[in-house]
Image (tube, coloured by chain):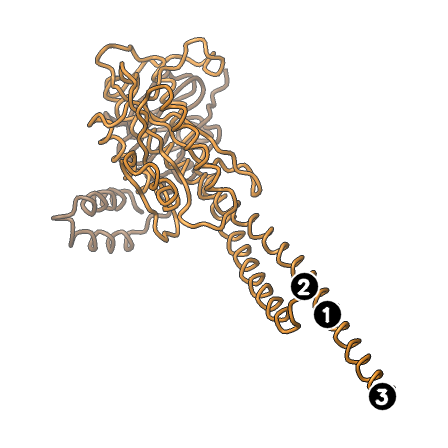
Amino acid sequence: MSNQMQFELASPQKLACSKPVVMVTVPGGEGDFGVLAGHAPMATTVAMGVVEAYEHDQTTVTDRWFVAGGFCEVEGDRCTVMADQVIPVKDLKRDVLEEEIAVFAKTAANDSDAAQKMAIAQAKLLVAV
Amino acid sequence: MPSLKDLKNRIASVKSTRKITSAMKMVAASKLRRAQDHAESSRPYARFILRMTQDLARTIEISPESSPLLVGREKVQTVLLIVLTSDRGLCGAFNGSIIRETRRRIVALEKEGKTVRLVCVGRKAYSLLHREHEDKILHKVESAAKKQIDLADAQELEDRLITLFEEGAFDVAHIIFNRFKSAISQIVSVEQLIPFGVPQANDNETEGRLACEIFEPEQNALMAALLRRNLTAQLFADLMESSAGEQGARMTAMDNATRNAGDMIDRLTLNYNRSRQAYITKELIEIISGAEAV
């Protein structure tokens, strides 16, 4: 059995990634988990956080994406993450996010939509480099 | 026989019409490219989430407490048709074929003794259906001059559908929309959105796929969340298909109109030249016969 599996990451707008990888770590709704080839079939929710793909071996992260919640299905030699938002971590900019948070913070108290957006922006800020 | 001046005016007006239709064609062509890219890139997500929902629906234990969104209601009395059209006209048979299909279904369903309800998405659906079916329309959405469909539109529609479903306003929902096949062909498609339905175990497509063993959170809670997400994703994908189809249909319609106007100008110009020549000949004859008489 090969030690690679097909990893697919999609947001409603686009397919962010589809390639064979060795390992993936996903921020599951009930705790982070890692997936290797041959994992038991599994269906779970995904929380806000970072999805990491290890393309060549189990020690080096090759890609990191911020995801804003969603679902993950592991089935056979395939791991599919369906997330509401997918942004490569390297595209997150601290100063832009801080501005965003400042804007949302003004209306967050009485606008649940803005509050939610602020929470997402804050989570992004935590992982931004 | 129209006078020379009339013909001249006519030619000028057809020429300006041609300018408008060819400009509209260009606009539609550039919008089409964008809409097509969006529609195509939104397909994987919808496909993945549909596959996951199917896998889960196959594994999950069906009990009387299962969500009616999955297994449906016992009694199917009211059928909801979600009609996706464009906001604007001038796109050939795009809206017409959707409305025709809708009317056909309404008649067929009513013959079976079912109650029909409608949700109109797009201004055209409402304006073409409200005269005969006003009492059936539960909700209408106008995307009013918005540039780009985003997920929030699908989310809003999904919220509304779930509320209506929970209120018992309908038992089954079908969506009627144009699937984008190519710039010149859109296919009227009908899909059942609610309930999701339990796939057959001996389905060829699902054969060889392993049944889920691990669920986080427990399966019914996961299923409930997934069903709603799937509904949003399918609505979103269908909206995208429809908007790409609209631009394609408009481009083709405007291309035809431009060509038609060209043909018409040629015909009118020929007429104009003929009349002008006849007029000149007539004047010459008058002069000559006048001179001969002297």
Please, what is the three-letter code of the amino acid marked with disc 3?
A: Ala
The chain identifier of the residue carrying mark 1 reads: B
- Earlier residue among tags 2 and 1: 2
- Estimate the x, y position of residue A71 in percent, counting from the top left: 32, 28
Left or right of residue A7, residue B251 in this image: right
Frontmost residue, B20 versus B60: B20
- Estimate the x, y position of residue B229 in percent, counting from the top left: 31, 30
- Earlier residue among tags 2 and 3: 2
Residue receiving disc 1: B275
Frontmost residue, B243 versus A86: B243
The label on residue B291 is 3
Please, what is the three-letter code of the amino acid marked with disc 1?
A: Ser
Q: Residue at the right extreme? A: B292
Q: What letter labels the chain drawn in orange?
A: B
Frontmost residue, B275 versus A71: B275
SS type, badge 3:
helix
Q: Name chain A's colour.
A: brown
